[in-house]
Image (spheres, rainbow, N blue to C red):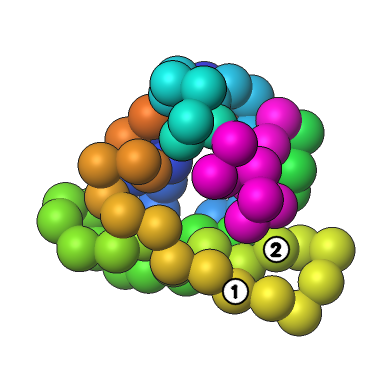
């Protein structure tokens, strides 16, 4: 497992754990970010700035703050 911010650009991942409070977890869930969701990281930046994600099961992209992305633990998939 690694942090979402440590994943290279265009890598596919699956969410393993959200290390957030209840309120943030509910906000992320309303965006579709929850355990076992498969994403692809689009943004190239490892530090600072928003993290852009693409859902693998739909044609949808979202951006989340870097601080919140540092609290999302993922595993890379092929």
Q: Residue at x 63, y 56 (%)?
A: 31
In the rendered image, residue 24, in percent from the top left (x then y), is placed at: 46, 35
Q: Quadrant of residue 43?
A: bottom left
SS category of the residue bearing label 1 = strand
In this view, 57 is above or below 30:
below
Residue 28 sits inside the magenta stretch: yes
* Residue for badge 2: 55
* Residue for badge 1: 61
Front-lying residue, 55 or 13: 55
Q: Residue at x 68, y 37 (%)?
A: 34
Contact? badges 1 and 2 (CB < 8 Å): yes
In the rendered image, residue 54, in percent from the top left (x then y), is placed at: 62, 67
Question: Can I make out residue 2 in this image?
Answer: no
Q: Residue at x 35, y 41 (%)?
A: 68
In the rendered image, residue 3, in percent from the top left (x then y), is placed at: 40, 32
| Residues shaded magenta | 26-35
Pointer 2: residues within 10 angstroms few (<14), some, or many (20+)?
Answer: some
Q: Residue at x 27, y 50 (%)?
A: 66
SS category of the residue bearing label 2 = strand
In the rendered image, residue 55, in percent from the top left (x then y), is placed at: 70, 63
């Amino acid at each position: 497992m690694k942090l979402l911010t440590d994943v290279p650009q265009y890598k596919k991942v699956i969410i393993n754990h959200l290390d957030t409070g209840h309120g943030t977890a509910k906000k992320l869930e309303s965006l579709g970010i929850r355990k076992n969701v498969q994403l692809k990281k689009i943004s190239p930046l490892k530090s600072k700035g928003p993290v852009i994600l693409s859902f693998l099961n739909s044609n949808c992209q979202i951006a989340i703050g870097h601080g919140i992305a540092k609290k999302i633990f993922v595993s890379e998939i092929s």
